[in-house]
Image: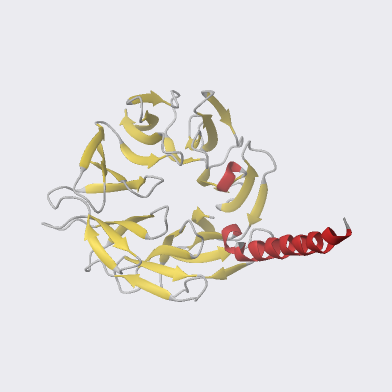
Amino acid sequence: MKKNKPNIFIYLIFLLLFGMFYSCGNNNSKSIIAEQKIDYFSRIILIEPSNGNFTYITDQETQGFSPEWCNKKEKIAFISDKNNQNELWIYDTNTKNFKMVNTNNQNVLNFSWAPNSKDIAIEVEKYENESNILLYSLENDSILPITRFDQKAKLGSWSPDSKWIIYNVENNIYKSNPRGVDEILLIDNGMNPLWSTNSEYIAFSIKDNNKMKLKVYIIDKNKVIDIDNGTGNIKGFDWAFNGNKLLYISDKENNDEIYHYDIKTKKTTRLTNNRVDENNIVWSEKNKKILFTSEAHGKSDIYVMDGNGSSQKIILNSGDDFASLDW
């Protein structure tokens, strides 16, 4: 037994050092990025949720909006009008360097990181005889067209394995392998598709009597189900980490509130209850927390709460509005 004690001691030290290294190496994953709106101006800020301290990623000379982390939490992509048109920029949190993605002078409207953090799908303004959804490779610093030049598409999201992209053309939802030639019709009436993180579902919205309704396509059953049969208008939705829970915003109680739907139990739960609007909902990893903005104090302040709606806490309160959250 005495001979084993040094080995046990060394093993415990190793575990301690590994835990410290892992914790330090993942600080970025706990940071929040947000679009801070000052009157008609927007800039990107990085927020430490434990104390509300923040740093500016972009300055007041350049507009920045719609920030999004890559899955590895090393880079932030955002849209900026630095050169008098909307361009996609990438900020490296380790080197503090910025890089502009060359989209051949086409205005960037939207983008989505691939889950592998190696590619970005980009939606650009439609030009004649040009594709308007593009694939950007970070490794090769190259652009490839995804959609046909004769169609105007609206970007949706990636499949969890980074092999497919979904988007809608008019009211039809397609999936495409971005480095191949396949374009497969999935849903013939829908828009704003969002692939679940477990690959089993695609959430999407449809317009019905001038209201947006939320639906889910069950891929292996080729079946569409309704999520919210109320009279409300759906304002946004986001999948939980395990893909079986869907977070969404609805105004069915006369203001924008946050709701949670469990795909397995088919149960809907209201998570916020007030007379003001909530917005910009984002799940954390492992479903532990929900990030959102609320106008409880007149401005869109940033809040966090548990996955069941409890333990609501303000993270950042200021005289400005916040939008486009991610963490």
* In the depicted structure, whether residue 55 falls above or below residue 117: below
- Which residue shows up at 34% across the image and 24% down it? 223
Q: Quadrant of residue 226?
A: top left
Q: Nearer the viewer, residue 102 or 279?
A: 102
Quarter of the image with the N terminus is bottom right
Which residue is at the far right? 2
Left or right of residue 131: residue 207 = right
- Which residue shows up at 34% across the image and 41% down it? 192
Quarter of the image with the C terminus is bottom right
- Which residue shows up at 31% across the image and 32% down it? 207
Residue 324 visible within the image: yes
| Percent x, y of residue 88 | 34, 65
Q: Quadrant of residue 111?
A: bottom left
How does the figure colour the protein chain or chains?
Answer: secondary structure
| Percent x, y of residue 184 | 22, 38
Q: Nearer the viewer, residue 140 or 274?
A: 140
Residue 294 visible within the image: no
Left or right of residue 236: residue 219 = left
- Which residue shows up at 85% across the image and 61% down it? 3
Count up the numbered dots: 0
* In the depicted structure, whether residue 317 falls above or below residue 183: below
Left or right of residue 75: residue 181 = left
Q: Nearer the viewer, residue 25 or 89?
A: 25
| Percent x, y of residue 219 | 35, 31
* In the depicted structure, whether residue 73 falls above or below residue 157: below
Left or right of residue 271: residue 237 = left
Q: Nearer the viewer, residue 143 or 1?
A: 1
| Percent x, y of residue 37 | 48, 61
